[in-house]
Amino acid sequence: MKGILVDSCILLDLFTDDENWADWSESTLEKYSQTNSLYINSIVYTEVSIGFNKIEEIESAIEALGIKVLEPPREALFLTGKAYIKYRKNKGTKTSPLPDFFIGAHASVSQFGLVTRDLAKYKTYFPQVRLIHPYEN
């Protein structure tokens, strides 16, 4: 399965019409949707849902973008825990697993690319994930 996982920052760019990033995010999703399926997981869904008043609104917005929602496989949940332990050993300060760990692990286990603007944790803890970002050469 060819797939691209879409990080919440990309959807928020579109949903808020971010003046700096909406155009890049829109053109990137359009480009990759031509040859890949686009996905989000329940973590991304949760993060972006706070900007909507009704579930029907977010469902409509996601459907309009041609994005499917997938649940993270158990292997990804396991990998999230392992990455979090490594993060804590590296002096990470959060006391609960961060959404980025769930998203990165899901992309890793599913062998998806990941469209994001937030690179640091993904590069450090999921170096095998192909990151699609605006800072590419």
Image (spheres, rainbow, N blue to C red):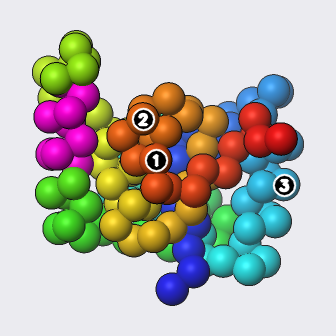
Of circles 3 and 2, the one toward us is 2
Image quadrant assignment for residue 119: top right
Queried whether the magenta region covers residue 43, the answer comes back as no
Q: Which residue is mark 3?
A: 27
Residue at the (64%, 73%) spot, across then down: 66
Residue at the (16%, 23%) spot, across then down: 89
Between 87 and 38, the one nearer to me in the picture: 87
User: For the image shown, how many numbered marks are present on the structure?
Assistant: 3
Q: Earlier in the sequence, mark 1 or mark 3?
A: 3
Image quadrant assignment for residue 125: top left
Q: Is residue 77 above or below residue 109?
A: above
Q: Which residue is mark 2?
A: 124
Q: Is residue 93 above or below residue 13?
A: above
Queried whether the magenta region covers residue 84, the answer comes back as yes
Alpha carbon of mark 3 to alpha carbon of mark 2: how far?
A: 27 Å
* Circle 1: residue type: Pro
Pointer 1 with pointer 2, Cβ within 8 A? yes
Residue at the (17%, 24%) spot, across then down: 88
Image quadrant assignment for residue 74: bottom left
Residue 65: percent from the left, percent from the top? 67, 65
Q: Which residue is mark 1?
A: 127
Alpha carbon of mark 1 to alpha carbon of mark 2: how far?
A: 6 Å
Q: Is residue 81 above or below residue 35?
A: above
What is the quadrant of the C terminus in the image? top right
> Label 2 crowding class (10 Å Cα cut-off): few <14, some 14-19, many 20+?
few
Q: Is residue 124 left or right of residue 133?
A: left
Q: Earlier in the sequence, mark 3 or mark 2?
A: 3
Q: Is residue 97 visible?
A: no
